[in-house]
């Protein structure tokens, strides 16, 4: 449990270990827990400490006591929520104008008094901050002058070697020289767009799409062609195929694993077909795999890059959602665009900081990353379920939710009468930040009754109260429209 466990009372530490086992499925619903004396002996704590731990878990609704029988993992009612329909954006490409809308979101993210349900990153307490700080200190002493110099593209060799090793687990078998390091996945995607398209060109994207992608398209003077998206399966490939046959598209940009904001995860058969489509039409595929490591199931989804035989796929990723958002350590494996992307990286930012790259590389090399990921995935899965259950309980009738199988986001469709911008304004007045749906489309009038909620914060009474307040505000807006 590390530093967090040391700061807990003894009974809370015991309860946390049991809670992790329940979240991971090691202890299943209906399963009998060890007797008080058995757990006392196993944990080397007193009987009273175990009783306190069991009472703590019972108060959280995780276990139940059965007279004359013992303690059991509580059976949880399966969450049943209607999901949003497949999106139906217009079939024409359009310039992007979302910058003004997005600016309000990131400004509120700087206010510590605001409950952050609008930002898409995990809370600091879920991240290996102490370990990384220690690595940075050691590297600063070791590297000295080297640590303050430019680390020109393709970037840290140590990090690229670690990425190559991890690519074997993804099914890609890439080499260190296939990677270029970047300042986060955002820069990786930006470089790929510049490499693949020119001003005025059209980029096919999911609808809804991450607003950072839309900002990049807007800043480069490109047009967005929004493709329908299924809430569980991602981009509708029949619609994409029709678009590729109908018009010239310079690149396709997708987030196949736990997309932002919907949380969809493209089935492997669809990933194969997607690569076949772009190869047939000779269109680059920019794959943003930033959430790939945050799967809740037993296996990581294989990237589209796995099925690429011609260098057609430009694979982008980073460690911003898993280790350290502020380190801005990202990467791209750009296939046949490698030389172009490497040159653009130099022109764009010259280099990424060496010390943060190598701190992440050492964390990967020493095995800390996989242990950290297991705990992070358990926590995020639990937090997503808590927020979804609170939405089901407190939001107005007719609310729909896309339940993801990974990541940390919920895409919520409100009743048609609830305007997400009005909800956002009222939420900010009460100290709550959300992401209104219209910032996830090139057309400002799209997704007006949708919001994206972040599940990156540990579930606390403060977060629970914020979701309940948000639901009450949404219900008030729905009621006012009926009067």
Image (spheres, rainbow, N blue to C red):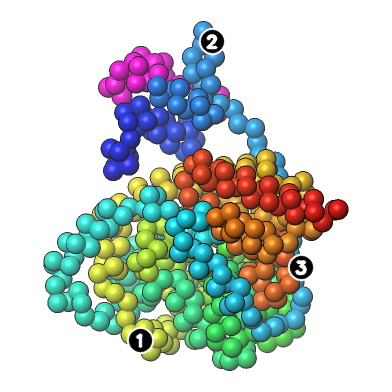
In the image, residue 374 above or below residue 87: above
Write the residue at 37% across / 30% down.
12
Q: Nearer the viewer, mark 3 or mark 2?
A: 2
Write the residue at 41% across / 71% down.
184
Residue situated furthest right in the rendering: 483
Task: Check if residue 49 falls in the magenta segment.
Answer: yes
Q: CA distance from mark 3 to mark 2?
A: 54 Å
Would residue 455 be visible to someone looking at this image?
yes
In the image, residue 450 above or below residue 77: below
Viewer-closest of 194 and 482: 482
Q: CA distance from mark 3 to mark 1?
A: 39 Å
Mark 3 and mark 2 lie on one chain; the one further toward the N terminus is 2
Which residue is disc 1 drawn over?
Answer: 346
Mark 3 and mark 1 lie on one chain; the one further toward the N terminus is 3
Which residue is disc 2 drawn over?
Answer: 67
Task: Check if residue 37 falls in the magenta segment.
Answer: yes
Tell me if label 1 and label 2 are in contact, CB under 8 Å. Answer: no
In the image, residue 64 above or below residue 433: above
Mark 1 and mark 2 lie on one chain; the one further toward the N terminus is 2
Place of residue 385 in the rendered image (x, y in percent of width and height, measured from the top left): 57, 43
Write the residue at 49% across / 52% down.
456
Determine whether, in the image, residue 20 is placed left or right of residue 140. Answer: right
Image quadrant where residue 53 sits: top left
User: Which contiguous range is marked in magenta?
Assistant: 28-51
Place of residue 163 in the rendered image (x, y in percent of width and height, measured from the top left): 35, 65
For residue 88, the mark is 3
Circle 3 Cα neighbour tier, 10 Å, few/some/many (<14 / 14–19 / ≥20)? some
Instruction: Indicate the secondary structure of the residue bearing disc 2.
Output: loop
Write the residue at 57% across / 48% down.
466
């Amino acid at each position: 449990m590390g530093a967090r466990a040391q700061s807990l009372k003894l009974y809370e530490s015991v309860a946390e270990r049991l809670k992790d086992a329940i979240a991971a499925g090691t202890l299943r619903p209906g399963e009998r827990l060890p007797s008080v004396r058995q757990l006392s002996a196993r944990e080397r704590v007193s009987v009273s400490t175990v009783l306190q731990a069991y009472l703590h878990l019972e108060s959280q609704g995780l276990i139940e006591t059965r007279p004359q029988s013992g303690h059991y993992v509580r059976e949880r009612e399966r969450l049943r929520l209607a999901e949003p329909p497949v999106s139906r954006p217009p079939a024409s490409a359009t310039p992007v104008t979302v910058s003004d809308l997005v600016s309000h979101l990131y400004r509120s993210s700087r206010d510590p008094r605001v409950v952050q349900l609008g930002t898409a990153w995990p809370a600091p307490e879920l991240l290996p901050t102490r370990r990384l700080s220690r690595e940075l200190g050691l590297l600063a002493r070791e590297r000295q002058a080297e640590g303050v110099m430019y680390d020109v593209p393709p970037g840290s060799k140590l990090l690229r070697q670690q990425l190559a090793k991890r690519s074997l687990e993804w099914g890609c078998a890439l080499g260190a020289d296939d990677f270029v390091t970047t300042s986060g996945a955002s820069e990786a995607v930006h470089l790929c767009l510049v490499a693949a398209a020119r001003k005025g060109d059209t980029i096919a994207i999911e609808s809804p799409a991450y607003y950072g992608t839309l900002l990049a398209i807007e800043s480069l003077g490109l047009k967005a062609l929004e493709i329908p998206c299924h809430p569980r399966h991602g981009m509708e490939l029949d619609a994409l195929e029709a678009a590729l046959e109908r018009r010239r598209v310079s690149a396709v940009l997708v987030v196949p694993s736990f997309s932002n904001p919907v949380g969809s995860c493209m089935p492997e058969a669809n990933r194969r077909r997607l690569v076949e489509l772009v190869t047939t039409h000779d269109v680059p595929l920019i794959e943003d795999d930033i959430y790939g490591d945050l799967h809740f199931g037993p296996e990581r989804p294989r990237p589209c890059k796995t099925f690429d035989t011609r260098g057609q796929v430009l694979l982008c990723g980073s460690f911003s959602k898993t280790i350290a958002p502020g380190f801005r350590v990202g990467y791209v494996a750009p296939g046949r665009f490698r030389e172009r992307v490497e040159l653009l990286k130099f022109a764009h930012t010259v280099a990424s900081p060496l010390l943060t790259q190598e701190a992440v590389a050492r964390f990967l090399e020493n095995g800390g990353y996989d242990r950290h990921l297991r705990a992070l995935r358990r926590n995020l899965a639990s937090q997503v379920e808590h927020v979804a259950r609170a939405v089901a309980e407190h939001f107005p009738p007719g609310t729909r939710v896309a339940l993801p199988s990974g990541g940390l986001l919920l895409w919520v469709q409100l009743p048609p009468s609830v305007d997400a911008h009005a909800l956002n304004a009222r939420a900010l007045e009460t100290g709550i930040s959300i992401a209104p749906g219209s910032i996830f489309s090139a057309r400002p009038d799209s997704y007006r009754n949708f919001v994206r909620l972040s599940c990156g914060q540990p579930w606390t009474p403060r977060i629970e109260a914020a979701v309940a307040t948000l639901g009450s505000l949404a219900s008030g807006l729905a009621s006012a429209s009926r009067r």
